[in-house]
Amino acid sequence: MALENVLIEKRGRVGVVTVNRPDKLNALNIRTREDILAAFDELEKDADVRVVVITGAGEKAFIAGADINEFAGKTAVQQRAVMKGRRAFDAVEDFPKPVIAMINGFALGGGCELALACDIRVASSKAKLGQPEIKLGIIPGGGGTQRLTRLIGEGKAMELILTGDMISAEEAERLGLVNYVYPPEELEVKTMELAGKIAEMSPVALTLAKQSVKNAARMEIRAGLEAETELFALCFSSEDKEEGVRAFIEKRKAEFKGR
Ligand code: COA
């Protein structure tokens, strides 16, 4: 299936997914969500790609949320059917490689939620983030009430979700909602530097590390610690572990193969 609203590009070991509906501020209609799923499926299979960066086309927006036009006239039964299918938010969260959100502008509603499903968020200083669903008489439905709360705590998540207020990138950084803020002209270089640094690590270890960190929000602490021990031990079945350890002993740079 040819992608209509998403571009895929490879820069060395980094795959870049660009949501490409700039005239609609990259709002997520059904087709765009399907394209995001297809793009991630393609990049999952591509062993050359070790890290994915997702961003929005144009100057203004990362993603300005779900496409509000698709809400008009929808019944509960119809909307539930749309949301019970395979979901881009969950596919990004469960993606076996690290995913970085490069937030180049508005990240609102489903846009903020897609960023929350990513592993690391880097924002332009002109980005604005928020969960404005309440202003439409609805609530976040792409994981916002859960992932935002786990990331920044209940008090601030509640405030953002109940007021629908947008916050600046600087405020988002202060809250721990984004990892870094850069001037717009530096955003891409800095994000690609971070992605490139992570892409040099063992893909096996990256997958297991991501899984284990995610377990912290999904498991009770003792189960999470036990799972960590198992995942740690599993690293010892990889060629990459032997390469990493030998490279340290031999005082050279490790060349990880993802095996
Ligand atoms: N769904 C559908 N279309 C959207 C959209 C969305 N979530 N966000 C923006 N657009 C469209 C606008 O309708 C407009 O289309 P048009 O040119 O055909 O009229 C175009 O994108 C540009 O947006 P515009 O509102 O003119 O830009 P702005 O700079 O004045 O305002 C925002 C920017 C982000 C503040 C404003 O677009 C907005 O509030 N968007 C909705 C955000 C939202 O509530 N998201 C959560 C949805 S659950």
Image (cartoon, grey):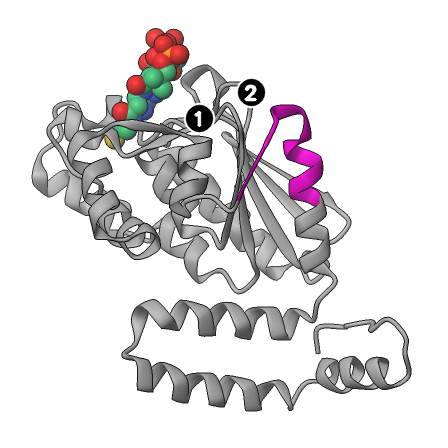
Which one is nearer the viewer's eye here, 207 or 130? 130
Q: Earlier in the sequence, mark 2 or mark 1?
A: 1
**Residue at figure coordinates x 76%, y 87% from the top left:** 242
Query: Is residue 191 covered in magenta?
Result: yes
16 and 231: which is toward the camera: 231
> How far across and how far down the image is residue 225, in percent?
40, 85
Q: Is residue 192 visible?
A: yes
Tag 1: amino acid: Asn
- The residue identified by callout 2 is 58
Quadrant for the C terminus, please.
bottom right
Q: x%, y% of residue 17?
A: 58, 40
Please, what is the dominant secondary structure of the magenta stretch?
A: helix
Q: Secondary structure at mark 2?
A: loop
From this viewpoint, which residue is outermost toward the front? 174
In the image, is residue 122 above or below residue 235?
above
Q: Nearer the viewer, residue 110 or 132?
A: 132
Q: Is residue 164 left or right of residue 26?
A: left
Q: Nearer the viewer, residue 140 or 44?
A: 140
The reply, left or right, for residue 200 in relation to residue 108 is right
x 46%, y 83%: residue: 228
* Highlighted range, magenta: 180-192
Type of the residue with mark 2: Gly
Is there a contact, CB below 8 Å, between mark 2 and mark 1? yes
User: Residue 18 falls in which quadrant of the image?
Assistant: top right
Gap in angstroms between the C-alphas marked 2 and 1: 9 Å
Q: Farthest residue to the top: give it.
A: 23
Tell me residue 8's x, y (percent). Answer: 62, 40
Q: Position of residue 140 (x, y in %)?
A: 22, 40
User: Residue sitting at 30 percent across and 57 percent down?
Assistant: 150
Left-right relation of 71 to 115: left
Residue bearing mark 1: 26
